[in-house]
Amino acid sequence: MRLVVSESAEDFIETHGGSIYIWMKKNRCCGGGFHTLGTATEAPPKISFRRDDACTNFALFVPETLSRMPDELHVELRRFPRRVEAYWNGCAWVV
């Protein structure tokens, strides 16, 4: 997996504990469902994580049940509200 991290996101992660947790969020809309990525600098409850060694600048955690990793994982900082967001192979949703 290739990890693409903006400098501002890396600084944000470092100042908020040095770890980022990324997981799949199931969303429902208009009679269907889709998946997006959830991100946080602290582990959310009820999800078991494992550390991924793709990143050396900070600790990257993904769900232990995740079997398929993306070709690329993009991590960027959103300005309003200020938070880190992740994109799987450049997309906001996972197929």
Image (cartoon, grey):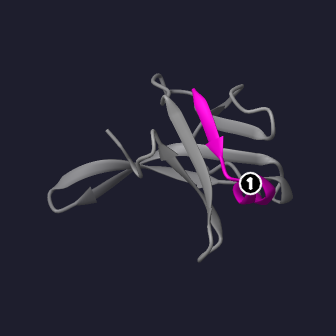
Residue range highlighted in magenta = 1-12
Decide if residue 15 is on the left or right side of residue 59.
Answer: right
Where disc 1 sits, the SS reads helix
Q: How crowded is the residue under tag 1: few (<14 C-alpha within 10 Å), some, or many (20+)?
A: few
Decide if residue 53 is on the left or right side of residue 28.
Answer: right
In magenta segment, residue 8: yes
Q: In the image, residue 78 lies at what x, y percent?
A: 60, 67
Decide if residue 3 is on the left or right side of residue 25.
Answer: right
**If the image is split into quadrants, where does the C terminus sit?**
top left
**Rendered residue at 62%/51% (across/down):** 44
Q: In the image, residue 1 lies at what x, y percent?
A: 57, 26
**Rendered residue at 61%/56% (across/down):** 76
Q: In the image, residue 50 lies at what x, y percent?
A: 66, 29
Q: Is residue 11 above or below residue 59?
A: below
Decide if residue 11 is on the left or right side of residue 21.
Answer: right
According to the picture, the residue beneath numbered tag 1 turns out to be 7
Note whether residue 10 is visible.
yes
**Rendered residue at 59%/77% (across/down):** 80
